[in-house]
Amino acid sequence: MKNFDYKGSYINKTDHHIYIAPTEELKDIIAHYTITFPSEVPASSKLFHIIPDASGCFIFQGRSRRDFWGPMSEIVVLENDLQKAPARFFVEFRPGGLYQISGLHQKKLVNQRQQLRYLDVQLDEELSLLYQSCKDYEQLIKAFNKYFTGKRKVNLLPARLIRAKEIIDQDHGNVSLEKVASDCHLSSRQLLRDFHNYIGLSGKEYAKVVRFNYLLKQIEEDDFLSLALQGGYFDQAHFNKVFKQITKTTPKKYLSNLADFYNEIYKF
């Protein structure tokens, strides 16, 4: 690709990110494409603490670097190199989206971060050819939309898993897995198998990630007791414990250092 400027439509744009929607047909698989780039505005923090999103992504950097992240159940801390790194292009999946593109059992991919060829050699080669054949991001996104539309027709999520996921999403993760299994006419064992196979995380882990990401959107003031009760936690102490397990910090410190954290607002 020769032209790294993007002139198309987008969901949102920041000093270092452009978020771009996929086609309507792909919105249940791909949350968005993302372009990251250096700018004259310096990065706001030295480290990025990336909140788990139970999803996965493909990352393209230059002509030869292609990586994948599996569904994440734990926080990842990286150097914030946005100011000095070259432009990167991300395909950000929704939970279950990586299965529909790869067809692979997702449990073994949880928290994996590797080169794309280790996920699937053919997939890596095909996406590499597409990436290198496109002259700009607009052309690339159009090509990727077409490619992923073809892929999704091969590996569909079962209706029972889609329904289970919808129940958890609608209740923002604050629902018992017994109720989910009952509403979907599944045994607890079958529900666990489905989540491990298609999402990667267990149903309980997935609900925890959904609930936590939802609550992060509500943190605008330090009324943590109300937030804890709203999220279905027993009390503020329980909420603080879970918060620290996921973010490795306390709610108050999180609020004081928001620029250090990155959570996906378009996946939940």
Image (spheres, rainbow, N blue to C red):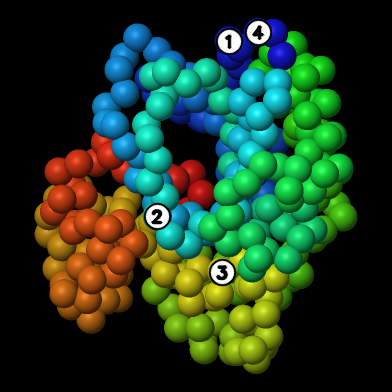
Q: CA distance from mark 3 to mark 2?
A: 14 Å
The amino acid type of the residue labelled 4 equals Asn
- Closer to viewer: mark 2 or mark 4: 2
For residue 104, which quarter of the picture?
bottom right
Three-letter code, disc 1:
Asp
- Determine which of the numbered discs, if any, sits on residue 75 in the image: 2
* Image quarter in which the N terminus is found: top right
Give the class, few, some or many, for how many residues have Cα within 10 Å of label 3's Cα (few <14, many ≥20).
Answer: many
Between the residue at mark 1 and the residue at mark 3, the CA separation in whole angstroms equals 37 Å
Residue at the (47%, 21%) spot, across then down: 85
- Name the residue carrying label 1: 5
Q: Earlier in the sequence, mark 1 or mark 3?
A: 1
Residue 130: name its quadrant: top right
Q: Is residue 155 above or below residue 195?
A: above
Q: Are marks 2 and 4 in contact (CB under 8 Å)?
A: no
In the picture, the disc for residue 25 is: none
Instruction: Residue under label 4, please give it.
Output: 3
C-alpha span from label 1 to label 2: 31 Å
Q: Looking at this view, is 4 or 9 the one in front?
A: 4
Horizontal and vertical percent position of residue 116 = 70, 42
Which is more N-terminal, label 4 or label 2? Answer: 4
Residue 162: tell me if it is visible. no
Q: Position of residue 123 (x, y in %)?
A: 81, 42
- Please tell me the numbered disc located at residue 201: 3
Q: Residue at x 32, y 37 (%)?
A: 47
Real-space CA distance between mark 4 and mark 3, rounded to the nearest whole angstrom = 38 Å
Badge 2 element: loop
Residue at mark 4 to residue at mark 1: CA–CA distance: 6 Å
